Amino acid sequence: MGIYEHVEIFAGLPVVAADDDEVTVADPAAVTWRISMEDFEAAPEEFEAAFEQLLQRTGPAGPTALIVGEWGSAYDTPFPYQLLVDNAARLSGLRSLFVGDLTGEECEISWINQADITALIEAFPALERLWIRGGTGLGMRPVRHEGLRELIFQSGGLPAGVVRAVGASDLPHLSHLELWLGVDQYGGDARADDLAPILAGRSLPALTYLGLRNAEVAEEIAAAVAAAPIVARLTDLDLSMGVLGDTGAETLLAGQPLTHLRKLDLSHHFMSTETAQRVVDELPGVEVDVSDPQKEEEWGRYTAVSE
């Protein structure tokens, strides 16, 4: 499975193509701007020109919300984060950023080349929402950031170094954290031990939504989550899109209470019908999603998004 559609609403705002001159936008801050090259092999200077055009159209503070699609050869060229860093003063209004809004037709998620995003985070202290799609070459060092409320990494294989960096970061206002951990074949080498600082919750005091999604090691994660201190203060726990089966589900139910949750998302799973129903029955008052059951193939289980 893969990703087949572009985001149409981001940061609660409708998405407008930056190069669509036929659309009149009275208030540049009232929409999310999307910049994307039609030519998937566009040269760097072409993307830079399109970026300059975006800045001209959105005014002295730049866009409030920005989505980047194809920047040119995303399958083998990392996104040029330095371009954003160098223009931070002209992007003073930026609050929400999504880099890598590419469908599988344009570039499979595990082929999208990223880079170290530390300088980006540091250059935008007012940034509140950051989504990154693609894990190849993705890096991050521990940071302190007062502004971030939502951090999402969508990947067919998320490097363990990024997971550890998030856990070692000081993000006092982060309320939503979503990690698509993926599979080892595509660089998803994180294990439960790498998640330990996040699950302890000491550096994420405001976290209420935790998504450990699309995980090949979902059973191992379920065991860690069952005793994780952070769970007691979550409203939403999302273990969807992975390979969770009966063993993992039973471990969750045998662990700490989950009845305080608003929602538990286990969709795209490998549980038996009986175990899935048991999870629902044992958590009355919790919105439990056990939709999209899968059947294990001869070669094993599979995550919802891998390539």
Image (tube, rainbow, N blue to C red):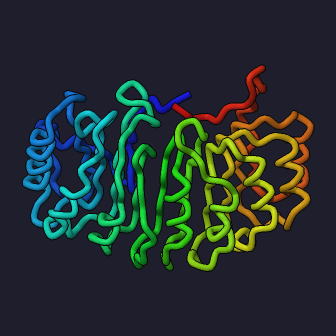
Task: Name the residue at 69% across, 62% down.
Answer: 193
- Tally the marks: 0
Q: Quadrant of the N terminus?
A: top right
Question: Residue 286 at what x, y percent from top left?
Answer: 78, 57
Picture coordinates of residue 259, whole percent (x, y): 82, 64
* Residue 176 place in picture, x, y as percent: 54, 63
Residue at the far top in the pictured view:
298
Height in image: 44 above or below 301?
below
Write down the quadrant of residue 184 in the picture. Answer: top right
Residue drawn at point x = 87 percent, y = 45 percent: 247
Viewed as shown, does residue 162 lie left or right of 89?
right
As rendered, which of 5 and 43 lies closer to the eye? 43
Give left or right: position of 177 versus 70: right
Given residues 247 and 57, the one toward you in this image is 247
Question: Can you say whether 96 is above or below 75 in the image?
Answer: below
Q: Is residue 190 above or below residue 108?
A: below
Q: Residue at x 67, y 32 (%)?
A: 302
Residue 161 vs residue 116: left or right?
Answer: right
Foreground pick, 265 / 167: 167
Residue 69 seen in the figure: yes
Question: Which image quarter: residue 62?
Answer: bottom left
Q: Is residue 280 visible?
A: no
Relative image position of residue 239 (x, y in whole percent): 68, 50
Does residue 201 lie above or below 77 as drawn? below
Query: Which residue occupies 29% across, 70% down?
Result: 124
